[in-house]
Amino acid sequence: MLVRAFTKTIMHVTLILSILLNIGICIYYWYIGYTSGAIVFTILAGALSALSTTPTLTFCSVLRAFLLGFPI
C-alpha cells in the first residue's frame, strides 16, 4: 500500500542512491589502486548513470535501435 502511494518518489530516491553508490565504488577502486577495474568501472558506471537519468522513452528507443538495428 505504501509503495503504491509513493512509487515515483521511491524510484527517484533509488536512482539517486544508485548513482551515488556507483561514484563511491569508483572512488574506492581508485583509492586502493585497483587501476584496471577502476578505469573499466568508471566508464561503465558513468555511461549507465548518464543513461539512467534520460527519460525512459528516449532510453528505450535508443536501446531498441541499438539492439535491433532500427533507425531511431
Image (spheres, rainbow, N blue to C red):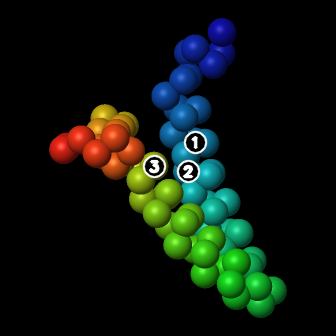
Q: In the image, is residue 26 above or below residue 15? A: below
Instruction: Look at 62% across and 51% down and name the residue there.
Output: 17
Q: Quadrant where the N terminus lies?
A: top right
Mark 1 vs 3, N-terminal side: 1
Q: Kindly check if marks 2 and 1 are in contact, taking CB atoms under 8 A apart as contact.
A: yes
Closer to us: 8 or 26: 26
| Marks 2/1: CA–CA distance | 5 Å
**Residue 29 in the image: x percent, y percent?**
74, 79
Q: Amino acid at mark 3?
A: Ser
- In this image, 71 relative to 22: left or right? left
Asked which secondary structure carries label 1, the reply is: helix
Instruction: Look at 24% across and 41% down and name the residue there.
Output: 70
Q: Amino acid at mark 1?
A: Val
Instruction: Look at 54% across and 34% down and name the residue there.
Output: 11
Mark 3 vs 2, N-terminal side: 2
Q: Amino acid at mark 2?
A: Ile
Asked which secondary structure carries label 2, the reply is: helix
Asked which secondary structure carries label 3, the reply is: helix
- Labelled disc at residue 13: 1
